[in-house]
Amino acid sequence: MSHNTVDTTRDATPAATPRPGYGRLLRTPGAWTFLLPGFAARQPFAMLTIGIVLLVQHTTGSYGSAGAVAAVTGVSMALFAPQGGKLADRFGQRAVLVPGVLLHTVSVTALIVLALADAPVWALFLAAVPTGASVPQIGPMVRSRWAAVLGGSPSGPGPGSGAGAGSRPRGDASLLPTAAAFESVTDEFTFVIGPVLATALCTGVHPAAGLIAEALLTLAGGLLFAAQRGTQPKTGRRGEGGSAEPRVSALSVPGVRVLAISFLGIGSVFGGMQVSLTAFAEEIGNPGMNGLLYGVFAAGNMLAGIVCGAVAWKIGPRRRLVVGYAGLTLATSALWAVHSVPLLAGLGLLVGLCIAPALITGYTLVESLVPASARTEAFTWLTGAVALGQAAAVTVAGQLADAHGASAGFLVPLVGTALALVTLIGLRSRLAPKVSGRVTARGKSHREPVTVD
């Protein structure tokens, strides 16, 4: 490290600056105003894919058809989510959310009606397109709000929206990794609850009950979140000092493209596990076991996320990302060979434990790679990549499960994570930010430590 570079981490003693932690994070002014409605609004996302799979499999008798319809939904979301993120960065989150949740509710209703009417699969595909395209991107929007209140762009509804609009004081930027971990934990908590709830409704009430609940929760939660205007990132594209901030596409940043490719592998784990665990539960004659097994898998992810947010990391984020993917690839390598419920639950827990470090590190890197004016779009590219990987995995795993049983479907997460790991290792250098707002032309920081990985 250059002698001209000031490493502020050495000055941050426990007496002067407390270590980042969840307690400090949750005491951030205004945080709870978007956290609670954000949690309610993102809950349906965890119910959508499994709800489609269970309904379509019931009406068609084919996991392949069910996986294909769910895949169309995922592909549609992956393609349209970044555009929604770009619009949210430009016009505000409320302007995108309100029409989006209304369209989603109508689209899911149409899909349910068509499925119960034994409509041909191509008709289900048509309904799946707007269903996926209109999925509200609550997770990226919450992450963008965290970045705004903790030290990214100013937050607030913008000029003319009331006293103090756009003038919220910045929080502690050192809490950004903790916020990323907290969001990962929140996401996975929804994936603990969502699949179990959807499965219970579909198997215990009616095959369409899971999707009906998803549509109603999306409508209510989305509108409630959209009403929280005080903490949404400001839409005016002005940099520090009032200078005009150039409009940048998040995908033009090389690091975002690398992260998006690597997140396809995480999506392959989610999609492959959902379909393969469903097929496994059917094979053993206990369909209700699916929700429990997937809940254990998601619980592992949530537990790892809690730990990641409480650790003061000494290794750089790029190295953590590679290590996380290596562990994930190793953990998925034995799924196909397991035929016992306890063993599968234990291995699923291990796979879940390996996902959170990779997810959290990827989202944390966005803060240093992408300007504030394109941050919601960047987060939606990563979320969309997960959805796209999940869609491909659902399709392939469904076909394999139909032809060769659940064991073959479990090969999908292994192949997906292995390919993502190879890509990540080869393009790892592109994850280093070239220039930061706090870095001089010579690369010497005057306010932040230099991270070596």
Image (cartoon, rainbow, N blue to C red):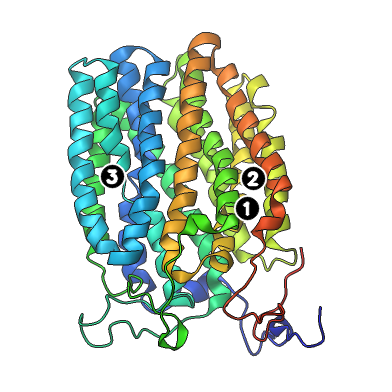
Q: Position of residue 312 (x, y in %)?
A: 68, 69
Task: Kindly identify the amino acid type of the residue bearing the numbered disc 2.
Answer: Cys
Q: Residue at x 62, y 18 (%)?
A: 339
Residue 12 vs residue 257: left or right?
A: right
Q: Which residue is mark 1?
A: 357
From the image, tell me which residue sits under label 3.
Answer: 134
Q: Is residue 28 above or below residue 76?
A: below
Give the structural element (helix, strand or loop) at label 3: loop
Of the 4 image quadrants, the one containing the C terminus is: bottom right
SS under mark 1:
helix
**Residue 42 sits above or below residue 403 on the image:** below
Indicate whether 107 appears above or below 277: below
Q: Are marks 3 and 1 in contact (CB under 8 Å)?
A: no
First reached walking from the N terminus: tag 3 or tag 2: 3
Q: Label 2, on which residue?
A: 354
Q: Residue at x 66, y 35 (%)?
A: 419
Q: Are marks 2 and 1 in contact (CB under 8 Å)?
A: yes
Q: Type of residue at label 3? A: Ser
CA distance separating discs 2 and 1: 6 Å
Residue 44 appears in the rendering:
yes
